[in-house]
Image (cartoon, grey):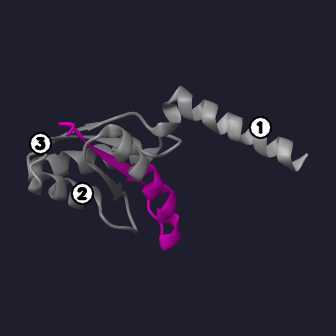
Amino acid sequence: MHETAVILFAHGSRDERWRAPFEAVRAEVERRHGGRVVLAFLELMSPSLAEAAALLAAEGVTRAVIVPLFLGVGRHLREDLPAMAETAARETGLTLVAAKSAGESPAIVEALASYAIGAAAVDA
């Protein structure tokens, strides 16, 4: 098992169906990562980042990387996430490190561009 857990961090929605694609990503990351992977939400859905961190700490995890599944870097990632991560780390003793947002990854930009080009070709 990998020593570093992964916390996939998404915005959240009142519509429970919105969770499905993030759960699919979580399952695939867990399969490929070989370690513990949990999903956490900024708001409107559970678990919160604090709840996910507490769960991992209770399982004996000591380090986790927070991977924001956001395309853009707005106030949530510049201000809310660092504050939430600092509080969760202080309360749980976990070492929490935040990765860049998914949208900052060239691989994600390429995947979205490929998807858009494919969608345009189908609709043409």
Q: Position of residue 114 (x, y in %)?
A: 70, 35
Disc 3: which residue? 62
Which of these two is toward me, 23 or 63?
23
Per the image, the residue denoted by label 2 is: 52
The furthest residue to the right: 124
Q: Nearer the viewer, residue 102 or 1?
A: 1
Instruction: Look at 12% across and 54% down and name the residue there.
Output: 59
Cα distance between the residues tagged 2 and 3: 13 Å
Residue 68 percent coordinates (x, y): 40, 44
Which amino acid lies under the numbered mark 2 shown in the image of this protein? Ala
Q: Residue 119: give x, y in percent of width and height.
A: 78, 45
Mark 3 or 1, nearer chain start: 3
Mark 2 touches mark 1? (CB < 8 Å): no
Residue underneath mark 1 = 117
Mark 1 nearby-residue class (10 Å; few <14, some 14–19, many ≥20): few
Observer-nearest residue: 26 or 11? 26
| In-front residue for pair 78/64 | 64
Distance of label 3 from label 1 (alpha carbons): 42 Å
Q: Classify residue 46 as left or right of residue 107.
A: left
Q: What amino acid is found at the position of numbered circle 1 in the picture?
A: Ile
